[in-house]
Amino acid sequence: MKRRKGTVLILSGILMLAAAVGLTVYNFSDDSRAENQSRQAFNFVVEAITQNAAENQASAQSPSALLPASAAGTVPEMPTVEKDGSPYIGVIEIPSQGISLPVLADWSYENLKIAPCRYAGSYYADDLVLCAHNYRSHFNPLRWVDMGEDVYFTTAAGETIHYVIANRETLQPSENEKLVTPSDEWDLTLFTCYVGGATRCVIRCLRAEN
């Protein structure tokens, strides 16, 4: 009886170890897939933005001049470029962490497998909220950023907005309302899940003075 129980425990341990190895392999593979997809999308979006900027310059218009004015009580729609049927509102870069990623206009679980997504808000209203998976090539490095680091968001129209990291918070998955509520305090919010998904890493940014 003891020998049989010991055999069961050994087999259980082997199965658990195999499952852990399998999960690690899957996570690494999924991370690599996401990195490849986001890099392809980034290159496409940057090329489209560069073309837009060249066309704007040729028509003697700066990107800022092309930003629509807000009507009273309304926020204009952000321009987009499209790839594979999906609209992108621009690219985000955090040089200190080597982050250079395209940003999809709408979030969904499928979109999050490709690139960061707009969760809420707009850069026109200075309340933009972006989310991404904690892939090492996506927003996983957010947990290592320091206050004062630079963040750059280049819109599909070719305008680059400079932000500075001003705060870090840890929120529960049930605290979604706190991601968008402080819109009068923060101009840009970035968030992702910590490993395990029990809490979220939330980075708050302000527009730079210059």
Image: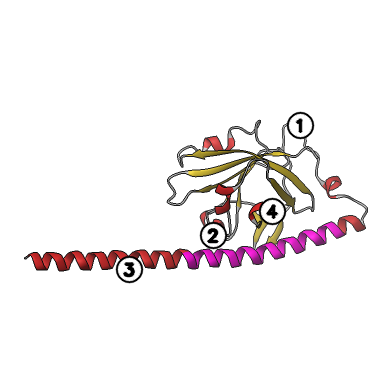
Q: Give neighbour class at mark 1: few <14, some 14-19, many 20+ (Cα, 10 Å).
A: few
Q: Secondary structure at mark 2?
A: loop
The magenta stretch spans residue 31: yes
> Where does label 2 land, which residue?
113
In depth, the one of 88 and 161 nearer the eye is 161
Q: Secondary structure at mark 4?
A: helix
Q: Amino acid at mark 3?
A: Ala
Residue at the image point whose x is 58% and y is 33% from the top: 181
Camera-nearest label, 1 or 2: 2
Cα distance between the residues tagged 2 and 3: 25 Å
Quadrant of res 12: bottom left
Above-or-below relation of 5 to 112: below
Cα distance between the residues tagged 1 and 2: 37 Å
> Where does label 4 land, which residue?
95
In depth, the one of 17 and 135 nearer the eye is 17
> Where does label 3 land, which residue?
18
Q: How is the image coloured?
A: secondary structure
